[in-house]
Image (spheres, rainbow, N blue to C red):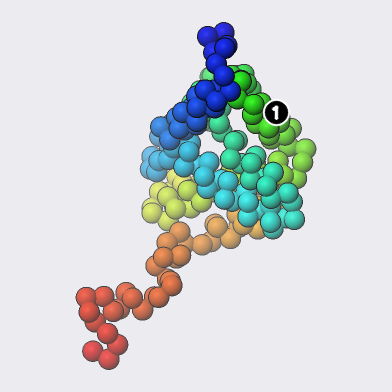
Amino acid sequence: MADMDGRDRLTRLADFFFECGMLRKTPRTGYQFLGTGSETVAEHSFRTTVIGHVLARMAGADVARTTYLCLFHDLHEARTGDFNYVNRIYNSSTRTLALEHAVKGTGLEEDILGYWKELEETATLEARLAQDADQLDFILNLKEEADLGNAYAAKWLETALQRVRTQWGRELADTIAVTDHKDWWFLGPDPSWWSRKNGKTSGK
């Protein structure tokens, strides 16, 4: 990182924002084994953060901290890429070093490296909730693929459900597992729309 020395903080923040944008272009690689589905790390991180916010409210935990833990939990993958389970059998990455390089000179070192240390140690409720949020996002994707007919997704779902750590995470996971992924739009807010399309109204 010697070539980054001498760049002022605002320039390093601009660098950092460009680096965050790489997550939009970084695919989550497990779907190549599942056979269906796809997403980027940025897409995964967004819903994980929403889930973490909700979990923290359910648990009476620090909502802001849980949300931040989720927001930055895969930031290192802008540099390392996403390693799925099979990749990790043969490859490893220096994730902490990647984060250190990413935030050097930005003034964000204490915050983001602190979030990462907390996540890795999982000693706090907020960290465990953030870990659950990560799994719940994956569980939601598996349920959708299973609903669409991927039998392997249903098998993966059984395993993923066992990785949830907290009671609040388990409650949500169990509910997700029995909820059709399309109900939120197919059944509401006005289910009668389906019988009224093409100008058809009740009584005709």
Circle 1: is it few (<14), some (14-19), or many (20+) Cα within 10 Å?
A: few
Q: Position of residue 22 (x, y in %)?
A: 45, 30
The image quarter in which residue 38 lies: top left
Does residue 16 appear to the left or right of 124 in the view shown?
left
109, above or below 65, in the image:
above
User: Most extreme residue toward the bottom, as rendered?
Assistant: 203
Determine whether, in the image, residue 126 is placed left or right of residue 152: right
Tell me the residue at 23%/89% (across/down): 204
The residue indicated by pointer 1 is 110
Q: Does 1 sit left or right of 57 as displayed?
A: left
Residue 96, can we see it?
A: yes
User: What residue is drawn where x is 51% and y is 51%?
Assistant: 140
How many circles with numbers are drawn on the protein? 1
Label 1, secondary structure: give it.
Answer: helix
> Which amino acid type is marked by label 1?
Glu
Q: Which residue is drawn at 39% across and 67% down?
A: 186
> Residue 113: x and y, percent?
67, 28
Rendering coords of residue 97 (x, y %)? 62, 19
Looking at the picture, tell me which residue is in the foreground, 41 or 16.
16
- 138 or 25, nearer to the observer: 25
- Above or below, 53 against 192 in this view is above
Residue, x 57% and y 12% (percent of image)? 6
Closer to the camera, 128 or 21?
A: 21
- Looking at the rendering, in which quadrant would you find the N terminus? top right
With respect to residue 42, does 113 lie above or below?
above
